[in-house]
Amino acid sequence: MEKGKLLYEGKAKKVFETENPELLIVSYKDDATAFNGLKKGTIQGKGVINNRMSNALMRLLASKGIPTHFVEELSERDTLVKKVQIVPLEVIIRNISAGSFAKHYGVEEGIVFDKPTIEFSYKNDELGDPLLNDYHALALKLATPEEIDTIKDYSFRINEALKEFWLSCGVTLVDFKLEFGRLADGTIVLADEISPDTCRLWDSATGKKLDKDRFRRDLGGVEDAYQEIMGRLEEHMGK
Ligand code: TMP
Ligand code: ASP
């Protein structure tokens, strides 16, 4: 499958049309942004890692009955995916306090929750992705009640599957962000990516951050952390 017209360029990925109107090619870049694009940089090799990691995790989730947009990995940076209409909700699942949760509620990072939390934000860069609840999402007609139920159900199931997988790699899944899309027939599928850009991943033994927080917070060793987390995944995938 060849890349056709560039349909969209985002902060970390480009999306191309293909000869098949139902399929797109996603191409992962090394560009990194944080704080709604305020901080910009490059993480060498990130595109290759995020592409391969996201695909491996989507295959794992598909094997657990979660429908995804993934079709085929075409090259180190390029993947064929089903064309979806993105539901403009960012779904965040948290197992442990960190990031904006710690900030909003004035607690330290690292508090292990009895139950995971879910939150939605409205995917809208101009507005800074404001937080909203189910009622707001319905009022804004971002999704139907049935779609919101499906998205919640999938998100918690994804959390269980990913938590278990990362634990087998000696990594704690702290929190992550998901996006879902609608296929032409309305089916909800997992879309976007699952990578160190969109998850907080802490070494279970040392607590070392192996994700994009190293970039966001200028902690150094960004490239090494991406390499290390990818190495962990490759060692444990399929075992
Ligand atoms: P937060 O604590 O900053 O709200 O982030 C929660 C999780 O969501 C964290 O794993 C990083 C991820 N995330 C994204 O993937 N994209 C974003 O734009 C933001 C703000 C967070
Ligand atoms: N990707 C988001 C941005 O550019 C934020 C983040 O991941 O922290 O702003």
Image (cartoon, helix red, strand yellow):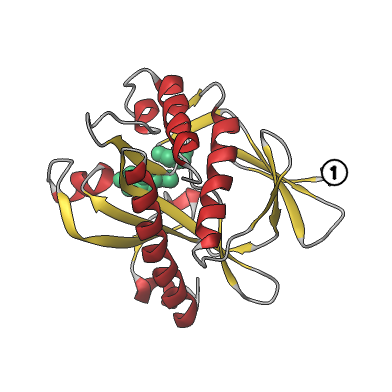
Q: How many marks?
A: 1
Near-viewer residue (218 or 26): 26
Residue 153 percent across, percent down from the top left: 40, 72
Q: Residue at x 84, y 58 (%)?
A: 20
Closer to us: 190 or 60 = 60
User: Can the viewer see residue 11?
Assistant: no
Q: Where is residue 48 in the image (x, y as percent from the top left)?
A: 60, 31
> In the displayed structure, would residue 104 be above or below residue 87?
above
Q: Mark 1 points at which residue?
A: 2
Residue at the extreme top of the image, as rendered = 220
Q: Can residue 216 be seen in this view?
A: yes
**Left or right of residue 59, residue 38 in this image:** left
Which element is circle 1 on?
loop
In the image, residue 158 sits, relative to residue 218, either above or below, namely below
Mark 1 Cα shell of 10 Å, populated few (<14), some (14-19), many (≥20): few
Residue depicted at 32% across the width and 45% down the height: 167
At which x and y percent is residue 91?
Answer: 41, 59
Q: Determine whether 196 is above or below 116 in the image.
A: above
Q: What residue type is labelled 1?
A: Glu
Q: In this view, does 167 lie above or below 158?
A: above
Q: Quadrant of residue 21?
A: bottom right
Which corner quadrant of the figure contains ligand 2? Answer: top left
**102 to the left or right of 201:** left
Left or right: where 7 falls relative to 213: right
- Residue extending farthest to the front is 239
Residue drawn at point x = 24 percent, y = 43 percent:
98
- Residue visible at 51% across and 46% down? 238
Residue 233 appears left or right of 22 = left
Q: State the residue in front, 70 or 161.
A: 161
Farthest residue, direction left: 107
